[in-house]
């Protein structure tokens, strides 16, 4: 019996969308480029929907189910060292030569390479000869290889363990930081971040993977989000004697809570020279602050050691801006509640604001990248939140959302929250 298209009535309209989106291509310096990122994403979305429409329902569901095997082939190629063994200039290399170079049995190696070719991860110019293509060349970067290794060895095991983990909980809750599917998948009693700190291989893979250009390529806009720091954070007038008595900050003070090695503050200051006179403060736990100082921090950046799960230290109370970049998605609502209430207690009701750069998932028809990322965060006890969820969480902790700064559905948004 022949397989029928999933939605044949949609095929013609999708072909029209693809044609229209392709019209947004322009020739720049001899190469085709899209007029905008949104135009490129429209073509990608239409092409993916066309593939789903043309395939039968059975083909679509089977394609989804096959993805673990595709990921395994990619991980095997990385572990074998295939990317570095192939000529970087695109010349082909025979199976015999690859087998000798990689010290891998030929039949076994050919099966792995065949699976990579089938998903366009490698090219096969002729029988039993292999070469780099545009996709596989991304694997020449050690940071890219580390990111994909991290995703398979740690995130992947946690994702595979997720159904078993949730079923054991009778589907009543998603777990927490100290009780999550990562621990089940990695056979450890340690949650993700503590495991990373104690396991040298995991730590090295994680740190190198976070330098990958893949992370940047998948994030539209800047890592600090689309918030216009320079335009919004106008100079603060001199404080009154009454404010001074309450320990409020006279100059514009931006505190990055849980800011790691201070990269976000450096990006903000570099992108907004009108804020050069502001006071920039990096707060994180003592071990991270010491690492940041050892690695080298600019003289203009102050540091404060502390945990945002405890009352904020006196030197940063009453600041104009408290910044949380990609922190809250690591924690469930209970943990975030503690954190947010600590921030609220340190804020001034008039001049302070809380900026949160994180994902804000659409309330309906969420884009797949965000839905998948939410499941990834679920494995370590975290969550990517919808706009409705953010409003409820912040409202319960004494905040109101003043504005959400976002340009596209897949971009990290910045929530500007004030005390109620």
Image: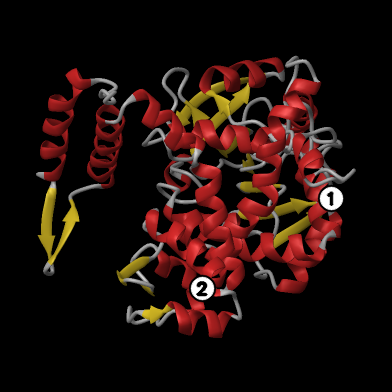
The structure residue drawn at horizontal position 18% and vertical position 57%, both measured from the top left corner, is: 33
Whole-percent x, y for residue 370 in the image: 50, 34
Q: Where does residue 60 sit, x and y in percent of width and height?
A: 38, 30
Q: Quadrant of residue 261?
A: bottom right
Q: Residue at x 59, y 23 (%)?
A: 390
Q: Is residue 391 above or below residue 263?
A: above
Please provide percent x and percent y for residue 217.
Answer: 42, 55
Q: Is residue 11 above or below residue 24?
A: above
Quarter of the view holding residue 257: top right
Q: Which mark is residue 261?
A: none
Check disc 1 and report the residue beneath it: 194
In-front residue for pair 230/398 = 398
User: Is 94 placed left or right of 206 in the picture?
Assistant: left
Contact between marks 2 and 1 (CB within 8 A): the answer is no
Q: Which residue is mark 2?
A: 82
Q: Which residue of the protein is positioned furthest toward the right in this rendering?
A: 189
* Crowding at mark 1 (Cα within 10 Å: few <14, some 14-19, many 20+): few
Q: Secondary structure at mark 1?
A: helix
Q: Earlier in the sequence, mark 2 or mark 1?
A: 2
Q: CA separation, marks 2 and 1? A: 32 Å
């Amino acid at each position: 019996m022949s397989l029928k298209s999933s939605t044949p009535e949609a095929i013609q309209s999708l072909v029209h969308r693809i044609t229209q989106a392709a019209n947004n291509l322009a020739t720049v310096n001899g190469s085709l480029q899209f007029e905008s990122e949104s135009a490129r994403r429209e073509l990608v979305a239409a092409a993916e929907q066309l593939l789903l429409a043309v395939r039968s329902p059975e083909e679509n569901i089977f394609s989804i189910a096959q993805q673990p095997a595709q990921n395994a082939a990619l991980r095997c190629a990385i572990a074998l060292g295939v990317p570095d063994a192939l000529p970087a200039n695109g010349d082909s290399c025979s199976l015999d030569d690859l087998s000798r170079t990689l010290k891998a049995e030929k039949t076994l190696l050919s099966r792995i390479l065949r699976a990579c070719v089938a998903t366009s991860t490698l090219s096969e110019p002729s029988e039993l000869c292999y070469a780099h293509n545009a996709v596989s060349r991304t694997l020449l970067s050690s940071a890219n290889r580390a990111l994909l290794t991290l995703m398979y060895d740690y995130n992947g095991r946690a994702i595979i363990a997720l159904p078993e983990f949730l079923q054991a909980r009778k589907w009543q809750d998603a777990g927490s930081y100290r009780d999550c599917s990562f621990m089940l998948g990695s056979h450890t009693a340690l949650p993700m971040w503590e495991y990373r700190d104690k396991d040298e291989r995991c730590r090295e893979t994680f740190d190198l993977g976070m330098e990958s250009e893949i992370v940047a390529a998948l994030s539209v806009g800047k890592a600090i989000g689309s918030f216009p720091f320079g335009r919004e954070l106008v100079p603060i007038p001199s404080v009154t004697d009454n404010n001074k008595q309450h320990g409020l900050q006279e100059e514009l003070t931006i505190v990055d809570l849980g800011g790691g090695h201070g990269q976000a503050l450096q990006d903000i200051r570099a992108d907004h020279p009108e804020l050069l006179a502001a006071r920039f403060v990096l707060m994180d736990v003592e071990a991270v602050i010491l690492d940041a100082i050892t690695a080298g921090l600019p003289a203009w950046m102050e540091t404060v050691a502390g945990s945002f799960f405890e009352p904020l230290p006196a030197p940063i109370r009453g600041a104009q801006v408290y910044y949380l970049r990609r922190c809250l998605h690591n924690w469930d609502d209970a943990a975030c509640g503690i954190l947010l209430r600590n921030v609220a207690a340190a804020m001034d009701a008039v001049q302070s604001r809380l900026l949160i750069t994180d994902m804000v998932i659409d309330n309906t028809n969420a884009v797949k990248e965000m839905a998948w990322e939410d499941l990834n965060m679920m494995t370590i006890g975290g969550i990517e939140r919808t706009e409705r969820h953010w409003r409820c969480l912040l409202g319960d902790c004494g905040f109101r959302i003043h504005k959400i700064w976002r340009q596209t559905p897949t971009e990290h948004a910045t929530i500007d929250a004030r005390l109620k």
